[in-house]
Image: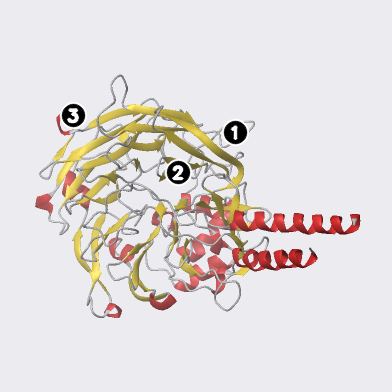
Amino acid sequence: MDCFAGKKSGISLFAAVVLLLFFLLLPGPAESLNKPAPNPFLSSEIYGITHFDSSQSDSTPFGPPRGAFRVNLGDKPVSHGGPVNIITLASTDPDYMWAVGTDRVAYVKKKNGAWDEVARFEALEDASGGGLPAIPAENFREFGESSAEGMDVDEMDQFLRNLFGSNYGDRFGNGSYSVVDKENVLYTHFGANLYGFALADPDDPSAGIAVRYVLEDILTAVEGPIFPAGTRLFGLSMTYDGHLAVTFSNGAAVIDRDLDLSSVHFHRFADYEYVSNSIAVDEAGGIYIASAGVVPEVGGIMRKLVWTGSGISDSPDDGAWQCAYEGSAVLPPMIKMGYGTGSTPTLMGFGENEDRLVVITDGAERMNLLAFWRDEIPAGGERLAGRISVTCGFDELPEWLQSEQSVVVSGYGAFVVNNLPGTVDPDLPGKNKILQVALMGPAYPTSYGVERFEWDAEKDEWSSLWARPDVSSTSMIPVHSQSTGMVLVNGYTPGNGWEITGLDWNTGRTVHQTIFGRSNHGNGAYAILQYLQDGELLFNAFSGPMLVRYETGGSGGCTAGGSFSLSAAALLVPLVLLAAGRKK
């Protein structure tokens, strides 16, 4: 009798453990949130613009299954390009997507699970007059299949020169931000030019990509011959009445989509300001943009400009405002750019009675998460609605906690990552960003630390919900999955090499891993993670965007391993319960 009771107890305990694993691996409930109004002039409600939507939320309806998967990226379909491929954008035709990298734009067919490049335009070669020529696909493949492990700065620099040219550092920053409009015109920038690309024949994408519009030497065209040294084009968005909103490092412009120079409205900032990110826009004409000082004494300015339909206003009478925020005293040693925020501003709160905020991280050496009132300030309040220190859960704070990524937002939840390693090798500061991002992780110490915050709309303040000092996020933009209730990052660890780590949005537990291993294919290099409708991963790798299907077995998919997959747990639970029932 006692023996039977012991067996029964053991079986019950085992069943309970399996059930617990099963429920941990189940996706969280799909979120029902007040979201930004869809922009009618974008190609799609999702992925028509960098950071996914006009609010720059980095939140997607799609996501991967929970569980652990090992993936060989070397045999996945890819559209080679780069070496930075920030985002693959939605076409107006759901069977295709626009791939944008620092070198080219391409049109990729994805119908019925395909991932086939059907057209390409070598935009950087065009913009540079051949000074930065097209790179053969084989060079990207060679880089992707190699590993940076064991390499030093000089070795990697020579490797990159051999593959991408002696001036490969000049490729960085081209095609950084892009947008596709409802006419399936892709707008982005290469060199000094702003382009509008379209299919040469919309009925036959294989006929190629054509330059429909171009504004050459846009700085001189818009600002005239006098502007600060180092001025450049950065961000792109679309107003809700169908104009392009463009950020320069020293101001913002609005222009018609046909790039007619006579339609330009330009608002110039002070010469001591510098913008290095993109912008968020709202349906009422609000343009949210954060600048930093070009010297540490200046700090940064978060501002709202207003597109009135006939001009750019900075007048409070039109709802515009500006507010200073803290910058850093010295330049970050690597990955991050500038003294101020690394964030493209992100909007939060969209319902009639909700707190309507815009959020960024500041430029302090140990950053803070900031929230500003977007519209009217509540009685007795200030424009800066809330501020909280980011610690990422470290017991002893490192010298730097800084992010080059925008804040991921879903509902009143916010998520930030630390991109600065605790120890920076003296060989890395001052080197070009492509070289730095190729080495950090496999060859030099990686960065660790993420943290999830929640805005309390009753108390009008931030709180830290959870933090993980053991999670690596090197340089890739993290994303939130609404359907699976997780946030996902790309990082490097000594045990697994490159991987995507999925954390439960509410608890911070690790609920997903896609382990790539040690090849450079797994390096997301300043890009953004994406997921498609069927839970497929669109990985915008250093070597080009590639498609990964999460199938437990079979060709072209992934192999589950390292923990229970959802399907394995689902099959195991009824078997265990059946066995327990037979023992009674």
Q: Please, what secondary structure does the residue beneath circle 3 have?
A: helix
Quarter-of-image position of residue 230: top left
Q: Nearer the viewer, mark 2 or mark 3?
A: 3
Percent across and percent down for residue 506 are 52, 44
Q: Please, what secondary structure does the residue beneath circle 1 have?
A: loop
Cα separation, mark 2 vs mark 3, equals 30 Å
Label 2, on which residue? 404
Kindly indicate whether the residue at mark 3 contacts the one at mark 2 (C-beta within 8 angstroms): no
Number of other residues with Cα within 10 Å of mark 3, as a class: few under 14, some 14 to 19, many 20 or more: few
Quarter-of-image position of residue 89: bottom left
Q: Residue at x 45, y 68 (%)?
A: 534
Name the amino acid, label 1.
Pro
Name the amino acid, label 3.
Pro
Cα separation, mark 2 vs mark 1, equals 17 Å
Label 1, on which residue? 398
Cα separation, mark 1 vs mark 3, equals 40 Å
Percent across and percent down for residue 446 are 60, 47
| In this rendering, position of residue 44 left or right of residue 65 | left
Label 3, on which residue? 316
Number of other residues with Cα within 10 Å of mark 1, as a class: few under 14, some 14 to 19, many 20 or more: some
Q: Residue at x 29, y 25 (%)?
A: 378
Question: Quadrant location of the N terminus?
Answer: bottom right
- Mark earlier in primary sequence (2, 3): 3
The reply to whether residue 513 is visible in this rendering is yes
Kindly indicate whether the residue at mark 3 contacts the one at mark 1 (C-beta within 8 angstroms): no
Q: Please, what secondary structure does the residue beneath circle 2 have?
A: loop
| In this rendering, position of residue 363 left or right of residue 267 | right
Name the amino acid, label 2.
Glu
